[in-house]
Image (cartoon, rainbow, N blue to C red):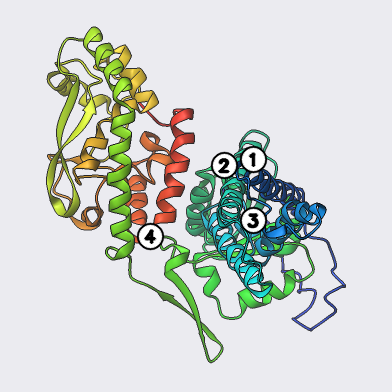
Amino acid sequence: MRHVDSFEIQPPTPPSHNGVPRSAWARARRRVSRWHRPYIAILLLLDFGAAALASFLAIQIFEQASSGFRHAPQSWFYTVAFVLLPLGWLIILWGNRAYDRRYLGLGPDEFKRVIRAGVAVAATVSFIAFATKTYSLSRWTVGFALLGAMLLILLGRMVARFLLRVVRQRAGHAGHRMVLVGTLPECLEVYTAVTRNPGVGLVPVAIHLTDGYAAARGIETPVPVYAGRDVLALVREVGGDTIAVCGSASAEPGELRRLAWQLEGSGVDLVVAPQLTDIAGPRVHIRPIEGLPLLHVEEPTLSGPALLVKNLMDRVAAGLGLLLLIPLFVAIAVAIRISDPGPVFFRQPRVGHEGRTFRVWKFRTMYVDAEERLASLVDQNETDGMLFKMKQDPRVFPVGRFLRASSLDELPQLINVLWGEMSLVGPRPLPADDGDFLGDVRRRLLVRPGITGLWQVSGRSDLSWDEAVRLDLYYVDNWSLAYDLSILWRTVGVVLARKGAY
């Protein structure tokens, strides 16, 4: 951490130009951040290979695969299956911006675009078959090839994203070096958000203050702080490739536009982190009216078809999960009884949807006298807020410590999901006797609590109470089925890493 003691203040250098049109071919510099180029090349190879592999599997499984090409040379059939169809996938994926660097390695948009491309490929193949009157095509073969290609492409991109995150976390490469511009509190808020998960590849390297110089003196900061400098010169000095304009700095009349002009041809990216930090992109739409870009914020989706699908998915997944996990449940139950005589399950009242109280199912991880021993440990609480947490809690027996670290103690909550008391993804359920959920915290009760959620994949017990509440409220206001699937996928990595579990 660094203390902000003094600033190097100098008159800003005039911008290189003021938005005067020039040749698009005369870029002053190539784009500074170029990690996405080899990554996109790898994705192209993976996608082409996935589509070709799906065609190969379809041909091997279905004997009538070439029924629509009986009067054509065999080479033409293989050309269509292994060259033209995979190339068609690449073209349509490109048209759906599935290779846009802004959507790679982060969020569900990349996968949405692959699914959208899959629908477009199916529609295109159907239209071509109809237009050429090729009615004798094997529908099972075509359907298997198209669906198989989409699933294999999605799988390949998941693997590629996982490897990209490993490279970012361990080697620090393939990321964006950011200079944050704004007031110190706004920049520090953005810093905390983007560094919470190193896998996203956003690495702040400096802060440039636009206001509040005196108030910032003496404050500890994780990166160097500058003021009164030319932003583009500062970015080049610290080796950055991205400028992030934070909070109120983005609202200064004309300044953001002039900064965008200054960055033209520099190879430096410009992003804006507005004050709508707790509202997700799908709820925010830009509506330009007479040259004024208005941000329209939609209401959260707390009902409707998507919620019905979520509930159905929860019940089906919970039922199948309980059936498949019966042998594991039996093994855990035996281990608990051997470790400490007493009940296998721990039942505790929790507050659920719309304030209804229910009893949560968990494998017992503490000795039977844990509640009596709590009073003597209260002063050793290592977290704030409503929950008591200790990294080395003496009330937890050895097998229970393993169950907590591996999150296996949470699996019986599938029973709560099956009964409709909980969801697979949602805010964490809090004990019923810890507060009355007044103020903002009460908004968490608008949706069912979840076995996993945004706070679990963002740090779990390592987070402060305020940060955990903020993440839960963010989920309530911005949930979607795609977001749920993304959180479930991230949960696998968090559980394997045993991050924040104690």
Q: Nearer the viewer, mark 3 or mark 2?
A: 2
Quadrant location of the N terminus in the rendered image: top right
The tag on residue 179 is 3
Separation of residues labelled 3 and 2 (CA atoms):
16 Å
The residue at which mark 4 appears reads as 478
The mark nearer the N terminus, 3 or 4, is 3
Q: Is mark 2 on a helix, strand or loop?
A: helix
Q: What element carries label 3?
A: strand
**Residue in the picture at 84% in, 63% down:** 29
Q: Which amino acid does label 4 sit on?
A: Asn
Q: In this view, does 101 lie to the left or right of 80?
A: left
Question: Is 119 or 218 nearer to us in this picture?
Answer: 119
Give the farthest residue toward the front.
71
Q: Which of marks 4 and 1 is in front?
A: 4
Q: Nearer the viewer, mark 4 or mark 2?
A: 4
Separation of residues labelled 2 and 1 (CA atoms):
7 Å
The residue at which mark 2 appears reads as 198
Q: Which amino acid does label 1 sit on?
A: Arg
The tag on residue 227 is none
Query: Would you place residue 444 above or below residue 318 in this image?
Result: below
**Residue in the picture at 38% in, 29% down:** 501
